[in-house]
Image (cartoon, rainbow, N blue to C red):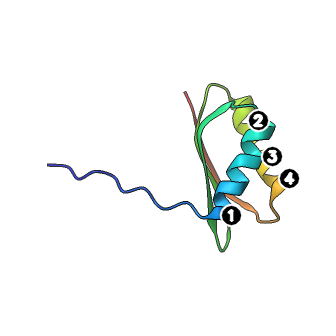
Amino acid sequence: MSSPAIAEPISPQEEHLESLIQRRLGNRVRNLRVLLRPEGVILQGWTATYHAKQLAQHAAMEVTDRPILANRIEVR
């Protein structure tokens, strides 16, 4: 028996960054999630191209002063 995955709550700051990045991408990344950690930012989601993945990372670098720890956006 498997237990359902419990989603981590989204902070207002994470939600704001997701919105800013998504506006710049024009919905090229699906299920975009920005996780803020004391050390930096982690990007999650999925996209159809590596170019969109790269655009998401550059957009994140422009809207936050924290380093990108990981770009976990999956290319499908």
**Amino acid type at image mark 1:** Gln
Marks 4/3 in contact by CB < 8 Å: the verdict is yes
Residue under label 1, please give it. 13
Residue 61 - label: none
Per the model, the C-alpha gap separating discs 2 and 3 is 8 Å
Where residue 74 sits: x, y (%)? Answer: 56, 37
Say which of 28 and 74 sits in front: 28
Q: Identify the residue at horizontal 77%, vertical 48% (top origin).
A: 20
Per the model, the C-alpha gap separating discs 1 and 3 is 16 Å
Residue under label 3, please give it. 59
Q: Kindly report which numbered mark, 1 or 2, lies closer to the viewer in this rendering.
A: 1
Per the model, the C-alpha gap separating discs 1 and 2 is 18 Å
Circle 3 sits in a helix, a strand or a loop, which is it? Answer: helix
Name the N-terminal-most of marks 1 and 4: 1
Name the N-terminal-most of marks 2 and 3: 2
Could you tell me if residue 25 is visible in this image?
A: yes
